[in-house]
Amino acid sequence: MPYDDVEAAERRDSPDLSEVSWALREVNRLSGAVDDAVTRRLGVGHNETLALDILMQSPVGMGPVELGNHLGIRSASATALVDRLEASGHVRRVRHPTDRRRLIVETTDSARRDVLAALAPLLADVDAIADGLSSEEAAVVIGYLRAVAGAMRRFSAP
């Protein structure tokens, strides 16, 4: 179903939402398409892209089983996924910084550069849009987006 049809159906079911909420809902819906574009540009599978995103957000990396739990896949599948990412140079297995018995998976510098390069056209477009805002408008947008991010964190917390 095209995005316009999806929004029209959602608007019928939730008529009291503000236009701001509808605009943000559209951005959220399109994030999946952005993930698909990054996946194509990196030349990896969808789970590999999700794994890279999870690992890039992890301050210390994580074990393959823990990564698999985040992705909702079994440990054997997680190990195979890490093997593919390691073979492609996107991740490396290293000793855990405080528990030397454990191996963790972390992204490589080249993986971070590859992800940012894949996102570069989108980030440039977003920056160009932001450059058109006055400093007051930018402050309002930043405040709103930070508050929404906080609401999303609270909503998704276990």
Image (spheres, rainbow, N blue to C red):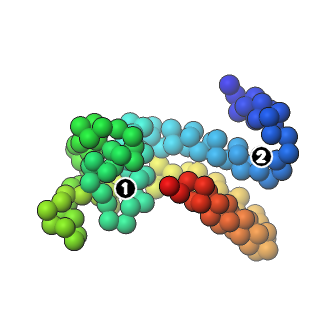
Q: Residue at 85% x, 40% y: name it.
A: 15
Secondary structure of the residue carrying tag 1 is helix
Tell which of 98 and 112 is nearer to you: 98
120 left or right of 47? right
Tell which of 33 and 110 is nearer to you: 33
Q: Residue at 22% x, 71% y: name it.
A: 98
- The image quadrant that residue 129 belongs to is bottom right
In the rendered view, tell whether residue 34 sits above or below residue 117.
Answer: above
155 left or right of 3? left
Dot 2 amino acid type: Trp
Checking the image for residue 55, the label placed there is 1
Task: From the top left corner, tell me how far across and down residue 145 is, in percent.
Answer: 68, 63
Dot 1 amino acid type: Leu
Q: Which residue is mark 2?
A: 22
Q: Residue furthest top?
A: 1
Checking the image for residue 32, the label placed there is none
What is the number of callouts on the image?
A: 2
Task: From the top left corner, tell me how far across and down residue 71 is, in percent.
Answer: 39, 43
Q: Residue furthest left?
A: 101
In the rendered view, tell whether residue 31 sits above or below residue 61.
Answer: above
Res 60 visible? yes
124 left or right of 88? right
For the residues marked 1 and 2, what is the alpha-carbon distance in whole angstroms?
30 Å
